[in-house]
């Protein structure tokens, strides 16, 4: 456990010692802030229009503001994950420091989990930028806290899944650009699987739809905590990190 924490700390230092972390946080904060402004503006405008027309339609902050914002945040993750993971192991291979790691008294799974956990912490810091906007809703309104917490849990699980996939892809190449591009393509593919099967109810289509990360994020956005969605994300994380360990074993044998 000590080695995992040390590697995680090293990764975080490398992120925050360069502009990478700050640029990603600024990028996410800017986009999410604009989406927050747009959602709240439309919410207030619709509320005023309903009152002026004498229509007492119920307004739900969770459904009309928070849920779309969480969906928007999960979409931004498609662009953030490749930039976070592309250097995890590819950079070590390019600079030759991977050999030092593999010959040190640190096990492969400690290296992999430490680097992945460092990426998770950075991803959580990026998501934390959105909490500033969400906190304003609690100051001026009365949204339900439980669906918000479940939604952020879903974002972390989805992010952990995509980051694990990116970690594996980063193990297969020395080029960070290639690692980032392939990671984006694979993440986008998992994102679009539900679109490909939208008008088909066959068994194969149901299986493909189950593999889509969007399908399992829907319940979290609604504030519903379903064990099958949690199991899916945890299984994908475990499988991706397992494949990363196999790739590390292959590097060790070739060395």
Image (spheres, helix red, strand yellow):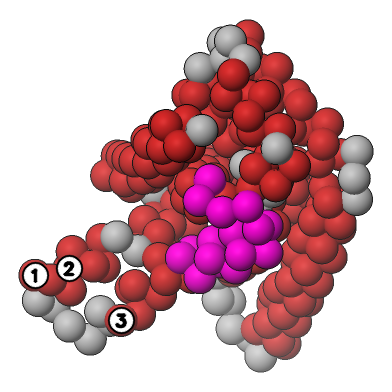
Q: Which circle marks residue 12 in the picture?
A: none
Q: Which residues are magenta?
A: 171-187
Q: Nearer the viewer, residue 45 or 254?
A: 254
> Quick check: 224 above or below 184?
above
Q: Position of residue 217 (x, y in %)?
A: 43, 57
The residue lying furthest to the bottom in this view is 53
Residue at horizontal 17 percent and vertical 68 percent from the top: 206
Q: Which circle marks residue 206 in the picture?
A: 2
Question: Under tag 3, what secondary structure?
Answer: helix
Mark yes or no: residue 226 visible: no
Q: Are marks 2 and 1 in contact (CB under 8 Å)?
A: yes
Residue assigned mark 3: 196
Question: Under tag 2, what secondary structure?
Answer: helix
Q: Position of residue 196 (x, y in %)?
A: 30, 81
Residue at horizontal 83 percent and vertical 51 percent from the top: 20
The reply, left or right, for residue 45 in relation to residue 189 is: right
Q: Nearer the viewer, residue 110 or 47?
A: 110
The residue lying furthest to the left in this view is 203
Q: Which circle marks residue 203 in the picture?
A: 1
Q: Position of residue 103 (x, y in %)?
A: 59, 19
């Amino acid at each position: 456990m000590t080695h995992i924490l040390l590697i995680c700390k090293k990764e975080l230092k490398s992120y925050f010692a360069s502009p990478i972390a700050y640029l990603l946080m600024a990028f996410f904060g800017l986009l999410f802030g604009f989406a927050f402004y747009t959602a709240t503006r439309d919410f207030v405008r619709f509320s005023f229009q309903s009152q002026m027309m004498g229509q007492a339609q119920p307004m739900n902050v969770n459904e009309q503001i928070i849920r779309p914002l969480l969906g928007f945040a999960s979409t931004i993750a498609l662009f953030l994950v490749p930039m976070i993971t592309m250097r995890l192991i590819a950079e070590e291979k390019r600079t030759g420091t991977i050999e030092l790691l593999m010959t040190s008294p640190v096990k492969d799974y400690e290296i992999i989990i430490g680097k992945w956990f460092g990426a998770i912490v950075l991803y959580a810091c990026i998501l934390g930028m959105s909490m500033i906007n969400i906190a304003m809703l609690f100051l001026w309104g009365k949204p339900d806290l439980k669906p918000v917490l479940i939604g952020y849990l879903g974002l972390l699980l989805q992010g952990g899944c995509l980051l694990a996939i990116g970690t594996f892809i980063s193990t297969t190449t020395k080029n960070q650009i290639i690692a980032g591009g392939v990671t984006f393509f694979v993440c986008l593919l998992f994102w679009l699987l539900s679109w490909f099967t939208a008008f088909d109810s066959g068994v194969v289509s149901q299986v493909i739809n189950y593999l889509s990360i969007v399908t399992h994020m829907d319940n979290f956005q609604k504030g519903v905590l379903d064990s099958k969605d949690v199991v899916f994300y945890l299984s994908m994380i475990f499988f991706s990190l397992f494949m990363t360990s196999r790739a590390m074993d292959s590097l060790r044998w070739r060395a």
